[in-house]
Image: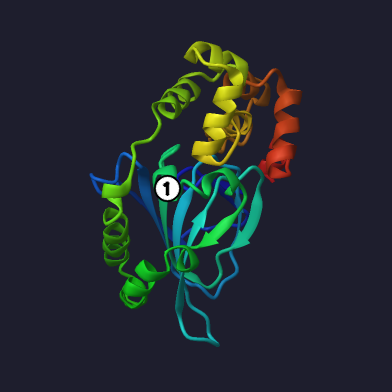
Amino acid sequence: MFYEQRLHEIALETIENQFDITELPPHPLLSPFIQSYIIIYNHDASISMPWLILPESNTYLILHFIQTLHSSPGIRLSLIGPRSRFIEIDRKQRRLTILLRFRMGGAHAFFSKLMPELTDESVNIKELWHDEFLEYEEALLNAAKELSYWKCLEILEKILLKKLHLLKNTHPGIKIFNKICQSNHETLTVAEIASNMGISERYLRKLVKDQTGISPKAILKIQRLTYSLKLWGHSLEPNWAAIAAEAGYFDQSHMIDEYQNLIGRSPGKLLK
């Protein structure tokens, strides 16, 4: 198994020379809302390639270019909400994938009504933005057929930039919450974070859920998991007890339980 940090996913089989993965900065006007663009180019879409998509608090706008032997090539543009548990996917037939990773709370500016119910869900953008999608669908498909990710990105940016004048900035409370989470890898509780922010725990829970689609408790679990995976660093003989302590788990047993809960595997099984 291989942990790909840019995707926050685990390849369940060897991926050497199979994929090109590139991470790019967003358009400057979109950077308050979008963290990065990620491009996945699949050299041979006919090969089965299973991946484990890990829990994550970010929301994504994802464009898939689907290429099969028995049907015409097509595109699918989806809004993918935060994930509270792992899922397994196969990137077979996905020749080109473009991910727009929103910052914490950034997707709320574009999809505010959907966010509270978006955890572990996906929405077809064709249904959500029918007129805008139809206007650009042919151009997107043609750009994808050329495997031109930059042309695809230009079109997606054009759609999003047209909505900028309607947007509100990310709630400042979300930025403070995220900063506290990112700068502390101790076993923080939601109550402690709320106290540090000078607000009630109830208000923090509602704010985070409304703005991100996922609970603050789930975000803390996901961030501990993510940090522990980075600490692992693909070492063949990792010190899991030390990793557990550094990542903010109470002890190694606590880390094992959360791994089983979130990704369906113990830390030791990641080495096999």
Mark 1 falls on what kind of element? Answer: strand
Toward which corner of the image does residue 244 lie, by quadrant?
Answer: top right
Q: Seen from this angle, which residue lies furthest left? A: 28
Q: Nearer the viewer, residue 68 or 161?
A: 161
Name the residue nearer the viewer: 257 or 229: 257
Q: Is residue 256 left or right of residue 182?
A: right
Is 224 placed above or below 139 here?
above
Residue that appears at 36% across and 46% down? 36
Could you say which quadrant of the image residue 109 lies in? top left
**As drawn, 176 above or below 256:** above
Does any portion of residue 23 appear in the rendered image? yes
Query: Where does residue 171 sit, x and y in percent of width and height?
Result: 40, 31
**Circle 1 residue:** 101
Q: Residue at x 49, y 61 (%)?
A: 78
Q: Is residue 140 visible?
A: no
User: Mark 1 is on which residue type?
Assistant: Arg
**Image position, residue 12 (x, y; %):** 63, 54
Q: Closer to the camera, 127 or 22?
A: 127
Residue located at (45% from left, 50% from top): 111
